[in-house]
Image (cartoon, rainbow, N blue to C red):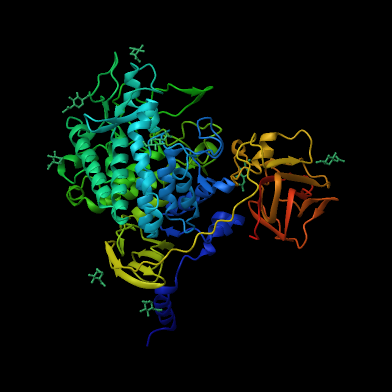
Amino acid sequence: MKSPLIILALIQGILSLNTTTITTAALPTYFHNDTPWYTPRIPLFTSSLSTLTEVYYYRWSLYRAHQRDLGPDGYITTEFLNDVSWQTQPYASLVDAAGFHLREGRWCRDRRFNGDYVGFMLDGERGDMYQFSEWVADSIWEGHLVDGDVDSAVAKLDRLVDVFGGWEGNMTEAGTGGFDGEKGLFWIQPLTDATEYTIASIDASGGVDGFIGGDSFRPSVNSYQFANALAIARLAELGGDQALAEEYENRAHAIKANVQKSLWNSTFEHFIDRYQVENENVTYWNYIRGRELVGYVPWTHDLPDDNETFAQAWVHLLDSEKFAGSNSLRTSEPSYEYFMRQYRYEGSQRECQWNGPAWPYQITQVLIGLANLLDHYPVSSNLGIVTRKDYTDLLVQYAELHYNPDRGGALDLEEDYDADTGRPIVGLARSPHYFHSGFIDLILSGFVGIRPRADDVLEVNPLADGDSVSFFRAENILYHGHDIAVQWDTSGEQYGTAGLIIIIDGETAASAPDLTRLTVNITRNKPPAIQRPMAKSIQLQSDSAWPRGSVSVTGADPESIHAAIDGRVWFFPEADIANGWDTPVGNGSEIWYQIKFGISTTTASAELAFFANETQGFDAPEGCRVEVLDSGGWVEVSGAHYTEPVANGITIASWDEVATECIRIVFVPKREQRVRLVEFKVFSEIS
Ligand SMILES: *[C@@H]1O[C@H](CO)[C@@H](O)[C@H](O)[C@H]1NC(C)=O
Ligand SMILES: *[C@@H]1O[C@H](CO)[C@@H](O)[C@H](O)[C@H]1NC(C)=O
Ligand SMILES: *[C@@H]1O[C@H](CO)[C@@H](O)[C@H](O)[C@H]1NC(C)=O
Ligand SMILES: *[C@@H]1O[C@H](CO)[C@@H](O)[C@H](O)[C@H]1NC(C)=O
Ligand SMILES: *[C@@H]1O[C@H](CO)[C@@H](O)[C@H](O)[C@H]1NC(C)=O
Ligand SMILES: *[C@@H]1O[C@H](CO)[C@@H](O)[C@H](O)[C@H]1NC(C)=O
Ligand SMILES: *[C@@H]1O[C@H](CO)[C@@H](O)[C@H](O)[C@H]1NC(C)=O
Ligand SMILES: *[C@@H]1O[C@H](CO)[C@@H](O)[C@H](O)[C@H]1NC(C)=O
């Protein structure tokens, strides 16, 4: 007879097969009072590599912080938290980061964010599609592989064709990029590729500068356009336009053939730039004189053939004299004459450069490329030049960059890093929580290995290395309208069952004893309908006419008053990215913040975001009320209901619908505390 303890353990083991989940109960650890935003929206993830778990959730807070509500124009995703001078006004959009944003956002269960953002970029002329190189068509295709929503993706086809055409016309006109018909390749100024100070731009200046100039045929832009053309071809096929599909399939194949023929440098065994510019220092069509990390971008988009020649490029990645710094991947090699020479400063602080610094932007591309190679380049991966262990190690190394030693080791991703020390280089006021890279997608499509597909199959091929990872589990993933979970447990000690398990809608659908590829047929469900409550209170820039904010305190800074209605919500503590309007220290008297709409506007609810930080002396107010301007003066809205005021989260007010030109919130700051009103968002509907 077995002891009761063993029987209990067996029962728990059986039960835990289907019942042990991470559960959303873990979320308050990461998101505190803001947890309600995340619970319905994000897939959950945990791993024995706790750095990956922690950074995974940080990356969702980064994603949330960069959702800018434009009011009637919906949401876009931003690259910098605050305004920068080169953004597209008045929205703060920048197309160079869009590919990363959409690829992270494809895992968000709330499809509004990607849907709005794609609409913003393609419907109408609001975003600038030609300010930087982009892979938006490809990202739309990649997004549809996760949600299975063919119609929404095909609906963008005409505009994607238009934008692709514009890369030949509009770019050439701007003088910063275009298509060379004779070579059959795209060229671009490195700055317009969002990578200033590359070998091409520095050497074209004779080593003097390199911020602008250095126009080149680059592996990056050609891979993007290859992927964009292929995405258009596939969408055209789904949309039933065979002729268009064929045309773009041919374009993609031509770009691929020309990249392989012309940008592969067999001396360096790497894809590298060739000059498009011709001047006293460099010659049209000559190769640049060194390897750059951008040479792996062809694999990010599955461009190269799978063969032994091209696989040699991966030898350089792990070589400490080449790309492998002690703490991250260099963008060019130490042998380059101007490696890490600092050219550009803001004041005395170093600015962004690509002559060696590590960039999360390109680390993401390399890791996607490496995952592609390990997943479906059998000839190359069988050479053993790079392995799953390398993938896991590089992913963990990348995760570690997210902890900023210059900010006490806090989670704070910035622009670029010294690949040897792992410290951020730029550290400007605009730098904290920079969003021009991916991580969530690397976890879910790489480490966990969900390889999204266009057909009715769920394929999972974890790249997690079995020797370094004892367990992981990802759940709450919306795939083709189903709830997916993937679980690995080496010993069975974590989840009660050893091995790899795929769970669809709560039922085990496939399993294997090892970390191996599994495929399961899956039907296609319609994804949940998208809810689009529209904020009425958003002022895009401080000089936009309406709506307008004002406060009861005299002498307040107009920019910070604007910040409380600018559609941006985050609760990060760094002072240089403080977001909202700060009241004076509480002394028992009432304070108000007022919004004038400029036109009679129906109102019925509001979302209030208050910041708190004990050491900085901020807290949520004692309570608050909403008032509207009536003929007789200010009155509290009728039927008002307020949730308990929370700090670093959303407080909700709702009331009987009322039309008004002016609305305000009135509150008393706690004694000796200030209130930072991060956002005051007003809706016409009950939220
Ligand atoms: C760019 O070119 C496309 C197609 O050639 C055209 O439809 C579009 O209006 C142009 N856009 C801009 C911003 O110039
Ligand atoms: C070429 O290099 C020299 C330095 O050797 C520099 O002064 C000059 O401006 C460069 N020419 C161009 C067109 O940038
Ligand atoms: C590769 O590039 C280098 C540097 O520009 C050049 O010297 C070399 O000839 C190139 N190799 C080939 C095979 O063209
Ligand atoms: C790899 O593919 C390229 C482009 O098709 C070709 O030039 C090269 O010879 C191939 N290498 C091998 C080893 O097959
Ligand atoms: C777990 O799920 C599988 C597949 O749906 C089912 O056959 C099994 O009975 C379930 N086990 C428990 C303990 O619920
Ligand atoms: C999966 O679907 C394919 C294609 O419809 C079919 O041939 C195959 O038998 C299915 N496999 C299973 C296990 O149902
Ligand atoms: C209390 O604070 C309000 C505004 O914050 C200010 O106008 C008022 O003068 C203060 N009262 C006292 C007694 O300090
Ligand atoms: C409060 O702000 C300080 C910086 O002033 C920061 O070091 C600390 O981590 C913040 N506290 C929390 C809980 O975020």
Quarter of image, ligand 3: top left
Q: Depth check: give the residue in front, 504 or 161.
A: 161
Q: Is residue 13 above or below residue 198?
A: below
Q: What x and y, as percent, mark residue 230?
A: 28, 47
- Left or right of 227 in this view: 69: right
Q: Position of residue 438 (x, y in %)?
A: 41, 46
Q: Is residue 160 above or below residue 637?
A: above
User: Which of 201/26 is in front?
Assistant: 201
Residue 492 seen anywhere in this rendered image of the structure:
no
What residue occupies the far right of the structure in this picture?
632
Residue drawn at point x = 65 percent, y = 34 percent: 543
For the point 35% across and 52% down, which residue is it? Answer: 142
Image height of 199 relative to 410, above or below: above
Question: What x and y, as percent, mark residue 418?
Answer: 41, 33
Residue at 36 percent across and 65 percent down: it is: 489
Q: Quadrant of the N terminus?
A: bottom left
Any part of residue 424 in sight: yes
User: In the rendered view of the protein, which quadrant contains the C terminus?
Assistant: bottom right
Could you tell whether 535 is left or right of 443 in the image?
Answer: right
Estimate the x, y position of residue 684 in percent, counting from the top left.
Answer: 66, 56
Query: Quick one: 384 or 122, which is closer to the camera?
Result: 122
Q: How many marks?
A: 0
Picture quadrant of residue 176: top left
